[in-house]
Amino acid sequence: MQTKKTILSASDLYYSYLNEDTGEHLSVLKNITFEILEGEFVCFVGPSGCGKSTILKILSGLEKSTKGKVNIEAKKIAMVFQNSALFPWLTVRENIAFGLKMENINKSEIDKIVTEKINEVGLSGFEDKYPIELSGGMKQRVGIARALAISPDLLLMDEPFSSLDILTAEKLRKELLDIWVKYKVTIVMVTHLVEEAVELADRIFIFAPRPTFIEEVVSINLDKPRDKRSQEYYDQVDKISRQIKT
Ligand SMILES: Nc1ncnc2c1ncn2[C@@H]1O[C@H](COP(=O)(O)OP(=O)(O)O)[C@@H](O)[C@H]1O
Ligand SMILES: [Mg+2]
């Protein structure tokens, strides 16, 4: 049997911060240990405010853990945020090109990659618009295109579809699955929607209330794309929903 490589692991992560008002140290993460394999799609679910975004920030290097170790074998990491975090003064095309310009790639190559990503995420015709002129769904598309433009082998996503209407979110989830299949990129996605996690993930990490730890890991062994009307799908959603403590 071929064993897959670990692309990302965390061992015994702790995170606490100082509450300036009370002078107390507030514990957010305790004893977070996991391994994620190359090509896996992992979703983090758990109660609001438990520390899921904090873990992603630590994994991406935006935040430093108080204790413990993160080991990243990925060559390139990209992150997608809930609010897309676009540069308002740059057009769609310029936003997507941003990471590539940092990488010192020549202009014609950048143009080629950006055009490819624009087509891939359905942004044709919007190239020269500014973020303020775009709907929420379109902004998320730009955020995803910008992340994909640098050809990441690890994509960290923090509630990327949470601010979108149901139909747009549904469409973007399907497109993300196509991208995951096409590029074999490893994806770690935070979501508060169990339905979304069961639709997309190979494994779901269920986090406990703060200070959080991994309460349970559930493997979803259903072929993708998944039939959301199937009994198995419904059973998994139901079981996991009941496992999340608030
Ligand atoms: N440096 C910090 N300063 C103040 N509060 C923080 C800090 N880091 C984390 N928190 C708090 O820790 C908790 C966990 O946050 P977060 O990771 O955003 O949760 P989640 O993404 O699961 O909703 C929240 O209550 C947040 O306000
Ligand atoms: Mg969060």
Image (cartoon, grey):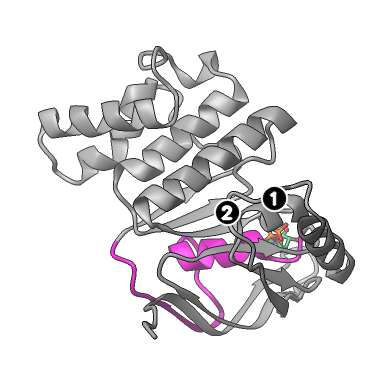
Q: Is residue 131 left or right of residue 136?
A: left
Query: Quick check: is 187 in the magenta stretch?
Result: no
Looking at the image, which residue is at 51% across and 47% down? Answer: 177
Q: Is residue 90 visible?
A: no
Query: Quick check: is 66 in the magenta stretch?
Result: yes
Q: Identify whether 191 is placed above or below 30.
A: above
Judge the density around disc 2: few (<14), some (14-19), many (≥20) Cα neighbours within 10 Å: few
Q: Position of residue 153 (x, y in %)?
A: 35, 59
Identify the secondary structure beneath mark 2.
loop
Q: Quadrant of residue 97?
A: top left
Identify the secondary structure beneath mark 1.
helix
Q: For mark 1, what is the residue? A: 196
Report the amino acid beneath label 2: Lys
Q: For mark 2, what is the residue? A: 224
Q: Quadrant of residue 71?
A: bottom left
Q: Quadrant of the N terminus?
A: bottom left
Report the amino acid beneath label 1: Glu
Judge the density around disc 1: few (<14), some (14-19), many (≥20) Cα neighbours within 10 Å: many
Residue in front for this viewpoint, 26 or 233: 233
Q: Which residues are magenta?
A: 49-75
Which numbered mark, 1 or 2, is in the foreground of this view?
Answer: 2
Which label belongs to residue 47? none
Q: Is residue 147 left or right of residue 168?
A: left
Q: Identify whether 65 is placed above or below 121.
A: below
Residue in front for this viewpoint, 28 or 40: 40
Looking at the image, which residue is at 34% across and 67% down? Answer: 74
Determine the CA span between mark 1 and mark 2.
13 Å
Q: Quadrant of the C terminus?
A: bottom right
Total numbered labels placed on residues in the image: 2
Q: Is residue 82 visible?
A: yes
